[in-house]
Amino acid sequence: MHRFLVVIEKSGDNYSAYSPDLTGCVATGASREEAEKNMHEAVEMHVQGLIEDGLPIPESTSFAEYVAVA
């Protein structure tokens, strides 16, 4: 199993999503939930394409953390 960080951002009236570890793998949606669902499908398709093309699946090296400031 492979795990990839997904970043979801509000962009105007929509949401966009991407994975820092999967260059070019992006998705959008009218809601956060829709963007997340679409991104899950995009990641699956991206990884399947890499497998079919005989290319390596990148290692997930990204992580996220919140930083609180006063």
Image (spheres, rainbow, N blue to C red):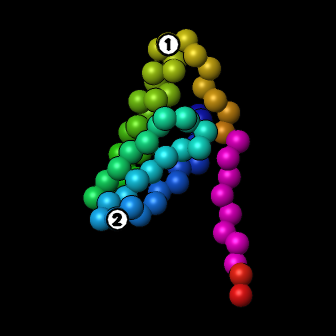
Location of mark 1 (residue): 53
What is the three-letter code of the residue carrying label 2?
Gly
Taking the magenta stretch, the answer to whether it contains residue 13 is: no
Q: Residue at x 70, y 78 (%)?
A: 68
Location of mark 2 (residue): 12
Mark 2 and mark 1 lie on one chain; the one further toward the N terminus is: 2
In the rendered image, the quadrant that contains the C terminus is bottom right
- Residue 24 position (above or below residue 32): above
- Residue 46 position (above or below residue 18): above
Q: Residue furthest front?
A: 12
Taking the magenta stretch, the answer to whether it contains residue 64 is: yes
Spot occupied by residue 40 in the image (x, y as percentages of width and height): 42, 43
Q: Is residue 33 visible?
A: no
Spot occupied by residue 43 in the image (x, y as percentages of width and height): 46, 37
Classify residue 55 by image quadrant: top right
Q: Residue at x 49, y 35 (%)?
A: 24
Residue range of the region highlighted in magenta in the rendering: 61-68
Q: Is residue 24 visible?
A: yes
- The rendered magenta stretch, by its main secondary structure, is classed as loop
What is the three-letter code of the residue carrying label 1?
Asp
At mark 1, the secondary structure is loop
Q: Residue furthest top?
A: 54
- Mark 2 Cα-neighbour bin, 10 Å: few <14, some 14–19, many ≥20: few
Q: Residue at x 61, y 39 (%)?
A: 21
In the rendered image, the quadrant that contains the N terminus is top right
